[in-house]
Image (cartoon, rainbow, N blue to C red):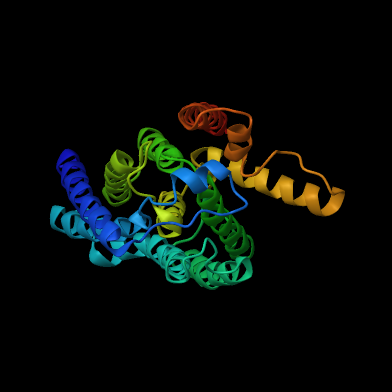
Amino acid sequence: MSLFLFVIILISSVILEKDWIQRSRRWHMTQVQKEYGPQLHVETKGKTPSMGGVMFPVASLIAIVLMTFMGWGTWGNLLKLWVLPWGAALIGFADDWLKFKSRSSEGLSSLSKLAAQILLVIPWSALIVLKHGIFLWPGMGLSWWLAVPLLAFITIGMLNAVNVTDGLDGLAIGATIISIIAFLVWISGDNLVRGCALATLAMCVAFLWYNANPASVFMGDVGSHFLAGILVSLCVFSNFLIAIVPLGFLFGIEILSVSIQLIAIHKFKRKVFRMSPLHHHFELLGWSENQIVTRFWLIHSIGAVILISLISLL
């Protein structure tokens, strides 16, 4: 049954994504590159269709229908798991849509996006804590006064971390695939959680088919927000919140590089990196896009394995 779910979601996602790429080309739905980003991106990526991540929520709906008929969860329980990635995708979609309509690289302002994330995440965190409870790892529950702010902080951090990682062809989606495989190998959840993870893996593999260098489509903020949301949801509903640390290893490094760069510029009037996030630093050092993506995947894999080993000792 697991193979059946994976294959159906994989095939559906490949078909849906191809259709979206064709429609995006007709609608000229491309992603305007940031002028302050690497100049090569402006020249080579400006005509690539974007917002390919809109297919993730559609594929998740197919997964819900399949899993319900397979007896792997009720509609209500499945909706609880997917509501965060759907809500996050909506925020990302709004950002992408504003960029498309204005033909600009800037959509929602940073404060507006953060406000939208807070309005989504804090109520979601409170409901999860009240209805489900939060466990740092199986058997170690957290009090509500600690669980709500901790979960909200982690979730908002992941939304932005996956977003900034999505800057090179295949980088964010490949890292997510590694994270989901690690989740499936490491964490023994029920059919509902593992089924959703398997469905996510299938849609990610399908997207990587089109997002591998040279990319035929970008996921956009709608896609990066969705992926961050589902990674957090899987950890929460597995009663293993700390698992987000190894599963989000590369994403954490990327967002940390952005934070370090901003602090260095505003406080010390100097840069630590040639450009942030970190993958742009290595671009400017002369690494090819494929070299960066492959090496970052390896770093993510190694980091995840080391952290999983350490957590397993607890």
Q: Which of 9 and 52 is in front in this view?
A: 52
Q: Where is residue 213 in the image (x, y as percent from the top left)?
A: 38, 36
Q: Where is residue 310 in the image (x, y as percent from the top left)?
A: 57, 29
Q: Quadrant of residue 221?
A: bottom left
* Residue 234 is at least partly visible in this image: yes
Seen in the picture, residue 27 relative to 15 is either above or below; the reply is: below
Instruction: Give left or right: position of 268 versus 35.
Output: right
- The N terminus, quarter of image: top left
**Residue at left offset 43%, top offset 49%:** 231
**Residue at left offset 41%, top offset 63%:** 89
Q: In which quarter of the image is residue 277?
A: top right
Seen in the picture, residue 270 relative to 90 is either above or below; the reply is: above
* Residue 245 is at least partly visible in this image: no
**Residue at left offset 39%, top offset 57%:** 30
- The C terminus, quarter of image: top right
Instruction: Give left or right: position of 206 versus 136.
Output: left
Instruction: Give left or right: position of 15 versus 207.
Output: left
Instruction: Give left or right: position of 197 versus 265.
Output: left
Q: Nearer the viewer, residue 26 or 136?
A: 26
Q: Quadrant of residue 75?
A: bottom left
Q: Nearer the viewer, residue 141 or 210?
A: 210
Q: How many labels does the image show?
A: 0
Judged from this view, the residue extending furthest toward the right is 268
Q: Position of residue 171 (x, y in %)?
A: 45, 39
